[in-house]
Amino acid sequence: MINNLLPVVGSVLLWAAACQAAAVPDGRVVGGVDAAKAQFPHQVSLRNRGSHSCGGSIISRNYVLTAAHCVVYEDANNNVQVYPPSQISVRVGSNDRFSGGVLHNIVQIVAHEEYGDFLNDVAVMRVETPFIYSESVQPIALPTQNTPGGVDVVISGWGRIRHGGDLPRYLQWNTLKSLSLDECEESIGWGEPAGICLMHEADNGACNGDSGGPAHYNGELVGVAGFVVGGCGNIYPDGYARVHYHVDWIKAHTDVV
């Protein structure tokens, strides 16, 4: 069973998993370790009504990239709506989920118009005041080439430390292995050009709260955390949106050139 990594706030992303018709994806990083200060200066904590719900990545002074399922909900008529920007903020420049760094309000959210069935799970958010870059606050570059299979990819986030477990206070990270499209198709039936599968040993990988967070390779942002299969830390690969596939869409909706 595929489960969105959804925000820890619960119902929103769990809704996304429950109402998809296809196999349903489940986002601390399971098996991870504490990040060093400023190790991931692009990492943000996406806050929904003040509480951590997802991750995201700084891609310019004004924009954050996250997962679409982190910023949408289903209304009473079963229509997908984007959260009011006033409900969302991001904490940057801190490994501590509770304090430090700087909080930025969000004034605009754009979710991919073709998000659905675990594909095109990307969204961009514009902050009210530009980020001030420092050692602990930096953008991460979008990929200049497609991510090959068989390479080490680093993930980070404040997701649950195990399936159904607690959230960590401090940012975690882990190293996973990218799969080719054929390998992903064979493993979980998701050999989609818009996605990238990241393989790991049991008791490792992404979990609830990591959704929308970064996967990077060669200093570039190559994935956006989307879902896990069979519960966090299972033997199956985790599903991420492939950033290279979405570069043109991202540039069209931000100030990234």
Image (cartoon, grey):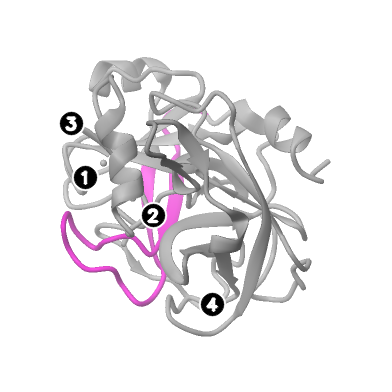
Give the spatial CA distance, label 3 vs label 4.
34 Å
| Disc 1 element | loop
Residue 66 drawn above or below residue 19: below
Instruction: Name the residue: 17% across, 38% down.
Output: 235
Residue 201's spot in the image, x, y percent? Answer: 21, 45
Instruction: Check contact, mark 2 vs mark 4: CB within 8 A.
Output: no
Helix, strand or loop for disc 3: loop
* Location of residue 52 (image quadrant): bottom left
How far across and down, in percent of the image, does residue 173 sit?
A: 39, 61
Along the horizontal axis of the image, is 138 left or right of 185?
right
Residue 1 has which mark? Answer: 3
Cα separation between marks 2 and 3? 18 Å
Which residue in the structure is indicated by mark 2?
210
Q: Residue at x 74, y 38 (%)?
A: 253
Q: Earlier in the sequence, mark 2 or mark 1?
A: 1
Q: Nearer the viewer, residue 131 or 84?
A: 84
Q: Position of residue 37 (x, y in %)?
A: 52, 78
Residue type at mark 1 is Glu
> Mark 3 or 1, which is nearer the eye?
3
In the rendered image, the residue lying farthest to the bottom is 100
Q: Is residue 131 magenta?
A: no
Cα distance, mark 3 to mark 1? 18 Å
Q: Is residue 171 magenta?
A: yes
Name the N-terminal-most of marks 2 and 3.
Answer: 3
Q: Amino acid at mark 4?
A: Ser
Q: Amino acid at mark 2?
A: Asp
Q: Earlier in the sequence, mark 3 or mark 1?
A: 3
Q: Which mark is residue 94?
A: 4
> Image point 76% across, 43% down: which residue?
254
